[in-house]
Image (cartoon, grey):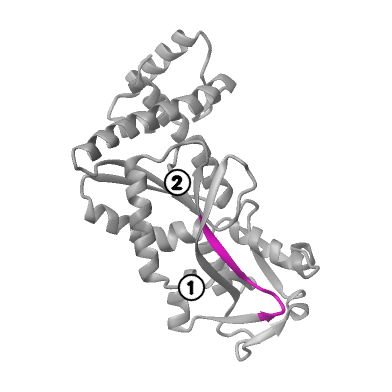
Amino acid sequence: MDLWQLYIFCKVVEHKSFSKAGKIVQLSQPTISSHIKDLENHFGCRLLDRLSREALPTKAGELLYQYARRFIALRDETEMALNEFKGKIKGRLAVGGSTIPGGYILPQIVGAFTKRYPDVSAHLYIGDTRKIINDTLAGKCELGIVGAAAKDKRVRQEKLIEDEMQLVIPASHKWAKKKSLSLKMLLTEPFIIRENGSGTLKSIQANLNKIGYRIEDFNVVAVMGSTEAVIQAIKSKVGVSIVSTVAISEELQTGKLKVLNIKGLDLKRSFYLTQHRHRSLSPLGQAFIKFLHKELDSQYPS
């Protein structure tokens, strides 16, 4: 067993495919299979099940994946520490973002960071809040930015910026001339929500609970897996929804969508910098967080 084999194993697990992993590490599929077989012989158990077109980890494989990610993270941290000692910011940075920060805030900041430090290879993973928190705990991401507070005690979070959500409707909607409406008016209107695990949905649910309502009180007609899907559904007049204004700035400028306030409902929330409480940040991660704070302070002054 060596780190290279563990790295290959992680790529197979993450992409659920021997061939996709081979393309990433530039090895043939038979060579990938040989490395996995060597690991299985070393540990004396099956690590991956070949099911249909997917390669999925067994229980032993899931356990190995958790430790393998820690080995690889420690290797990266070692290399970055020595580069920093030599006065260089260099290495691989893995950052996660839930739908809003991952799609609308982090790309610009990560891009600016890699321009400042061209020897950095940055990987931005995007998913719902639950996935990004899990990826951070698993070591796939060194840090993440999500739209909801985590209850897991292994997670350390810091509030970064405040986000404002509003009711979003098509420009041709019957409420288009209104600036606000009551929550009771909204309950019978066809309503679109995000999937379970979404920070947006968690925030809406928490704010509704404060005033004695639940998401089940709404006339939910569709559940979408991304904010972009919600926006497209609103444009197609499937229903209305509560969305971050960060995600619809272009549509508001062109007049395709309108926003309304909901009387008595506070729709403000925070984005949280999320890290593993018991894992030390690499020097590169520390450098990125300093850069992140500086960029956000200039873009979202308090």
Residue with the most extreme bottom position: 177
Judged left or right of residue 45, residue 91 is: left
> What kind of element bears circle 2?
strand
263 drawn magenta: yes
> What kind of element bears circle 1?
helix
Q: Choose top left, top right, bottom left or bottom right for residue 102.
A: bottom left
**Visible residue check, residue 173:** yes
Q: Position of residue 183 (x, y in %)?
A: 74, 78
269 drawn magenta: yes
Q: Which of 210 and 104 is in front in this view?
A: 210
Q: Where is residue 272 in the image (x, y as percent from the top left)?
A: 52, 56
Q: Do the residues labelled 2 and 1 touch (CB within 8 Å)?
A: no
Mark number displayed over residue 248: 1
The majority secondary structure of the magenta stretch comes to strand
Residue at the spot 66% in from the left edge and 65% down from the top edge:
204
Mark number displayed over residue 143: 2
Residue type indicated by callout 2: Leu
Q: Give the range drawn in magenta.
A: 262-272
Mark number displayed over residue 285: none
Q: Residues within 10 Å of mark 1 (few under 14, many from 20)?
A: some
Residue type indicated by callout 1: Ile
Q: Choose top left, top right, bottom left or bottom right for residue 216.
A: bottom right
**Is residue 209 depicted above or below 1 in this figure?**
below
Q: How far apart are marks 2 and 1 (CA)?
A: 26 Å
Q: Where is residue 54 in the image (x, y as percent from the top left)?
A: 50, 30
Residue at the spot 51% in from the left edge and 8% down from the top edge:
44
**Is residue 153 depicted above or below 62 in this figure?**
below
**Visible residue check, residue 49:** no
Q: Which of 263 and 234 is in front in this view?
A: 263
First in sequence: mark 2 or mark 1?
2
